[in-house]
Image: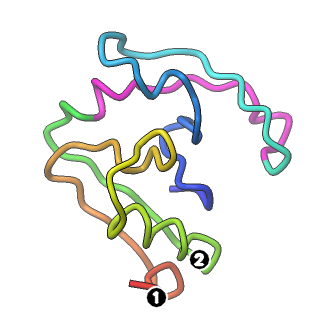
Amino acid sequence: MGPDGHTASLFPGEPLIGDRTGIASAVDVDKPYIDKVMRYRVTLLPGVLECARYTLCLATGADKAESLQKVLKGPRAPMLFPSQIASPDMAWYIDQKAASLL
């Protein structure tokens, strides 16, 4: 999970978050904090992520604490926090800094 709650190269507000029929897509990530070399990506789409038998998500560092709190404890809003897109059995791997607001 990124500091803005993104996952799988699906960033907040990305129209692909609503795609439940496709499998994968190219994504152009034009964010100031993304290295320009990493700008062009391929991602799995939400339908695939939601149907996965088992999913793992990693969130480490204090810069993830606020988003992690909203993803895990806030209302479901995947368009704002794409990390809420997951299989029912998603496991989270977090460190103490990311978990500081939980």
Alpha carbon separation for disc pair 2 and 1:
8 Å
Front in this rendered view, residue 94 or 4: 4
The disc labelled 1 sits on which kind of residue?
Gln
Q: Do callouts 2 and 1 mark residues in contact (Cβ within 8 Å)?
A: no
> Residue 65 location in percent, x, y?
53, 76
> Residue 96 location in percent, x, y?
46, 88
Q: Does residue 53 appear left or right of residue 90 in this picture?
A: left
The disc labelled 2 sits on which kind of residue?
Gly
Q: Which residues are magenta?
A: 34-49
Decide whether residue 43 is among the magenta residues: yes
Q: Can you tell which quarter of the image residue 61 is in?
A: bottom right
Decide whether residue 87 is among the magenta residues: no
**Residue drawn 48% across the image and 50% down it:** 81
> Residue 33 location in percent, x, y?
81, 51
**Residue drawn 50% across the image and 56% down it:** 1
Mark 2: which secondary structure? loop
Query: Which mark sits nearer the N-terminus, 2 or 1?
Result: 2
Which residue is labeled 2 in the image? Answer: 61
